[in-house]
Image (spheres, grey):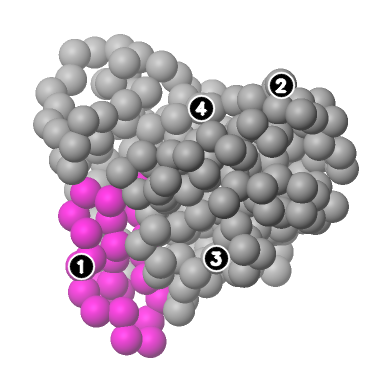
Amino acid sequence: MTLDQFVQDLARDAGRIQNDAFHKPHTSRVKTGRGDIVTEVDEACEKLIIDRIRLHYPGYPILSEESGAIGVEEDRPVWVIDPLDGTRNYSMGIPSFCCSIGLVRQGVPEVGAIYDCVHDEMFFARRGSGAFLNGERITVAEWDSLEDAVVSVAWVRTKTKRQRFLGCIETLSRYTSYFRRFGSAALVASYVACGRIHAYMQGGLSPWDMAAAVLIVEEAGGCVTDLTGQPIDIRNPKIEVAMANPVLHDRLLRDVVSHMD
């Protein structure tokens, strides 16, 4: 089995666990604070993924949202996984969640898969080979104006200054009122990659949120940086992103981010 197929099959199998248990009662516990929860489905998906990686790629380090770091990076690629991105949505019966699996070397993603089991949508990319949705090549939207752009803006309140992002929304509202917030960072990024959303900005993200997402958007022709315009390092524990097609991305940084502080 090729690496590409392994990653996609793994994300799809985790998605089956999610789909089978969706709309059923769940047990949950709080992790770091209010709203940050984990369910038995997160843990079941994580176990499946980690066990399968250990079987087929023994010795490779793993970084997971629920278990943290397993193994030492050294010079090997690291598996970075979010077994269920959008747990709060999932626990409330909102069909906006996914499984995200990325293979990252020295902070740069090389392979990534994001699977939405509700809609049976597999987003996949390998660096240098393009981005795909269910096997069909995808590209970011060509929209190059902030006027009436569909934009997702979000932040993690425990990791970022709320006022900065409220200022972002205030500035963007001069151009558009088409704001979206889906509650799953990896899925929002996938929607940027296939042109369903024009732009996405968020602060306070973790490596597992963006390990596959950054690659998929870049391979779809998008530009992804932090809010200062620097490349994303997946090893950063607090990631801020701005992503869109290159022209719109430049406008975001010039006309929006510059007014945030």
- When asked about the image quadrant of residue 238, the answer is bottom left
Q: Circle 3 sits in a helix, a strand or a loop, which is it?
A: loop
Image vertical order of residue 235 relative to residue 66, above or below: below
Please name which of the two marks, 2 or 1, marks the residue nearer to the observer.
2
Label 4 Cα neighbours within 10 Å, binned few <14 / some 14-19 / many ≥20: some
Give the extent of the magenta segment: 58-82
Q: Between marks 4 and 2, how big is the CA–CA gap?
A: 16 Å
> Dots 3 and 2: beta carbons under 8 Å?
no
Q: Circle 2 sits in a helix, a strand or a loop, which is it?
A: loop
Position of 246 compared to 172: left or right? Answer: right
Q: Which mark is residue 177?
A: 2
Answer yes or no: is residue 4 visible: no
Q: Between marks 1 and 3, how big is the CA–CA gap?
A: 22 Å
* Nearest to N terminus: mark 1 or mark 4: 1
Residue occupied by mark 4: 182
* Nearest to N terminus: mark 2 or mark 1: 1
Question: As shown in the figure, which amino acid type bears the numbered disc 4?
Answer: Phe
- When asked about the image quadrant of residue 250, the answer is bottom right
**Residue that lies at the very extreme toward the bottom in this rendered image:** 75
Image vertical order of residue 23 relative to residue 149, above or below: above
Label 1 Cα neighbours within 10 Å, binned few <14 / some 14-19 / many ≥20: some
Q: Between marks 2 and 1, how big is the CA–CA gap?
A: 43 Å
Residue occupied by mark 1: 70
Residue nearer the viewer, 29 or 180: 180
Question: As shown in the figure, which amino acid type bears the numbered disc 1?
Answer: Ile
Q: Between marks 4 and 3, how big is the CA–CA gap?
A: 22 Å
Please say whether residue 261 is one of the residues in the magenta stretch.
Answer: no
* Nearest to N terminus: mark 4 or mark 2: 2
